[in-house]
Image (tube, helix red, strand yellow):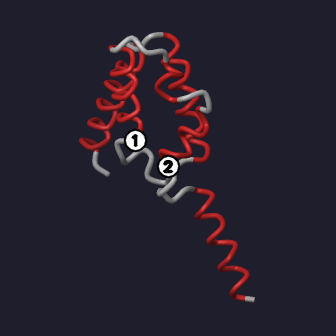
């Protein structure tokens, strides 16, 4: 990764954070919890894809239409996250694969 790519990545992240900060407070709180959850259990390619930006897009639309954040996500926010990443490879999947490989070598 070159210096230009690093700088561009930082610019994109700062723009993303600015969008989150422009959301209503309840949306910001739920977004930060979603972000923590996804960074902990989420897909391997989380930072490369547009998942977080897509969530902000969804939240911006919900806020613009006057909906509360839980009207957008539903009351089970973790379930909302799980549904978003259901077809993605997670770090837990990678770990399980490595454990299975070690078992098969014995």
Residue 51 badge: 1
Q: Which residue is mark 2?
A: 85
Q: Residue furthest left?
A: 4
**Image quarter of residue 76:** top right
In the shown orientation, is residue 93 left or right of residue 23? right
Seen at 26% across and 36% down, the residue is: 8
Up the image or down, 5 lies above or below 66; here it is: below
Q: Position of residue 23 (x, y in %)?
A: 41, 14
Q: Earlier in the sequence, mark 2 or mark 1?
A: 1
In which quadrant is the C terminus drawn?
Answer: bottom right
**Label at residue 65:** none
What percent of the width, then of the height, locates residue 77?
Answer: 59, 32
Query: How packed is label 2: few (under 14 Cα within 10 Å), some, or many (20 or more)?
Result: some
Q: 61 above or below 91?
A: above
Q: Secondary structure at mark 2?
A: loop
Element class at badge 1: helix
Residue 93 quadrant: bottom right
């Amino acid at each position: 990764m070159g210096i230009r790519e690093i700088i561009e990545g930082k610019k994109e992240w700062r723009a993303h954070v600015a969008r989150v900060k422009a959301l209503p407070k309840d949306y910001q709180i739920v977004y930060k919890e979603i972000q923590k959850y996804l960074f902990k259990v989420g897909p391997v390619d989380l930072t490369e894809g547009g998942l977080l930006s897509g969530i902000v897009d969804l939240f911006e639309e919900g806020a613009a239409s006057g909906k509360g954040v839980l009207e957008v996500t539903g009351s089970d926010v973790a379930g909302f996250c799980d549904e978003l990443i259901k077809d993605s490879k997670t770090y837990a999947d990678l770990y399980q694969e490595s454990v299975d490989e070690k078992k098969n070598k014995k």
